[in-house]
Image (spheres, grey):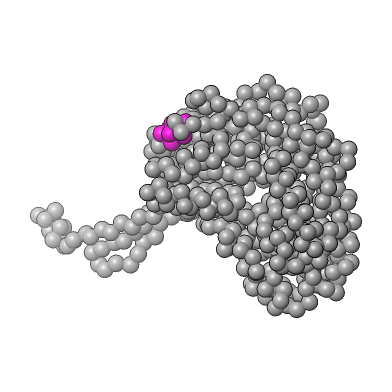
Amino acid sequence: MSHMTTTDPVNDYVTGHEFKMLIGGKFVGGSDGKTSTVVDPSTGSDIGEVPVATARDVENAVAAASQAQPEWEALGVDGRAECFDRFRTLVRENRERLAMLDAIDCGNPVSGMRRDIDNCDPSLDGYPAMAKAMTGEVFPGDGDRLHYSAHRAFGVVGRINAFNHPALFAITRSLPALITGNTVVMKPSEETSLSTLAAGELFAEAFPPGVVNIVTGGAEVGDGIVTHRSIKRLGFVGSVPTGLLIQRRGAESGYIKQFSLELGGKNAMVVFPDVDIDEVVRGAISGMNMTTNAGQACGSNSRVVVHAKIYDEFVSKLADALGDYRMGVAYQNDTDIGPLVSRRHWSKVTGYVQAGVEDGATLVRGGDRPQGLPEGGNYLEPTLFADVRPEMRIAREEIFGPVMSVFRWSDYDDMLSLVNGVEFGLTSSVWTNDLSVAHRTANAIQAGYVWINDSTQHFFGTPFGGWKNSGLGREDSKDEVLSYLEQKVVHARFGDAKSALDRMLR
């Protein structure tokens, strides 16, 4: 499908446009007037400003959500689904704008960001159906007693999102809370706020005032959401250190809170010697999310664990294939791999490249800035290390960039020890043509989601989430819908029905 190419996307979508927070159905700046500068990661240029919320702004957002929540819950699933229908239409109509804003703001190629917007459809369609299926239960009782369960919304839900899929997270991660009758106070990453603020315009048109509220800013704003007395349920997508901090700050607030945390990964791709090597090379690049966000994804298969029989051929073919992709400005249609999100993150990722070299891994390709691209951009070539050992930093720590490490294995049990020997457990993939080996290995891997002969794909309705330090809770499924509902059990005693009838009919 062809796409209209604007002559200057930054000018068309950012320059001269005001980006405001959404509080109580109104578009507002920070109450003290402070803003933060938006930097284009493709060029390093300052291109705009977004508001920075104050503690008072967070308080106002929670108050608006609290006021709107009873009527929103009273609409019922069908009434709330009507708002979802309006919102779906608006998202589709604004597909190009949201995708371009993400490309401009976070450096992901616009082609992938268009797919992100398209991938909102299953959630917009699916969550209302799931919510209607959330019925209670009747429990056995004796002759004059009845026990049954029912669900109610928590009230106000907090959502804090990561930088790597800004519009997708702003839209889809709010939906299970909304369809179950909760109202939402949401904060995007301070590094990528533009598309979330633009989505706020669509939320305001489709939903009643106060149902969705969006505040922007850094850690202080997030802390205000996490510790607020009226927010008992929070969802977060981001790093393990921040997830640990959120749990601690929630406890320190003095209020019991429930969390879902979709955190980092150091995901393994296990390759057996009976595979089609060319197919697995393509799967490795796809599973690394190279062309979606330059490997800045929690589910990326950054550890490729390849059997010794095919190791050398695999590494050679993977190195060649990584050279076939065009790096460039993220909002150009022919770009395959864009820049990293910020100069600070670029420095972190290149620091890992240096650590890999110093620890003795073989740098097969990449590791440098590509030539011929804007000097201020945060570009890093797809980087491939071979001869990686488990004790190296690049083997243990989440890099969150376009850096792949390839390990050699020959003993099955040693391979499993390598795969499971990290603190993460988000995803993994197993590549073999032997079905029994595939399922045995998938069962032995300590991860919340395992693909067999596939990678990186999410399928709405199947629970997605991690083990170990990779998180709590599950997304994209009925498990997530239930997680936004509190359960109560009602016990009723009817008394002596015969006596009541005698009195009634006397």
Q: At 46% across and 48% down in the image, what residue appears?
A: 249
Q: Is residue 422 above or below residue 374?
A: below
Q: Give the x, y percent position of residue 5.
A: 81, 30
Residue 357, by quadrant, is: bottom right
Q: Nearer the viewer, residue 37 or 498?
A: 37
Q: Quadrant of the C terminus?
A: bottom left
Query: What is the magenta range?
Result: 57-65
Q: Give the x, y percent position of residue 351.
A: 74, 51
Q: Quadrant of the N terminus?
A: top right
Q: At 78% across and 37% down in the image, what residue appears?
A: 377
Q: Is residue 449 above or below residue 290?
A: below
Q: At 56% across and 57% down in the image, what residue appears?
A: 471
Q: Give the x, y percent position of residue 215.
A: 53, 34
- Res 209 visible: no
Q: At 47% across and 52% down in the image, what residue appears?
A: 248
Does 63 lie within the magenta span?
A: yes
Q: Nearer the viewer, residue 194 or 222?
A: 222
Majority secondary structure of magenta residues: helix
Q: Is residue 115 above or below residue 8?
A: below
The residue furthest top is 16
Q: How many numbered circles does the render carry? A: 0
Does 302 lie within the magenta span?
A: no
Q: Is residue 171 left or right of residue 387?
A: left
Q: Nearer the viewer, residue 45 or 335?
A: 45
- Res 330 visible: yes
The residue furthest left is 506
The residue furthest front is 358
Residue 71, by quadrant, is: top left
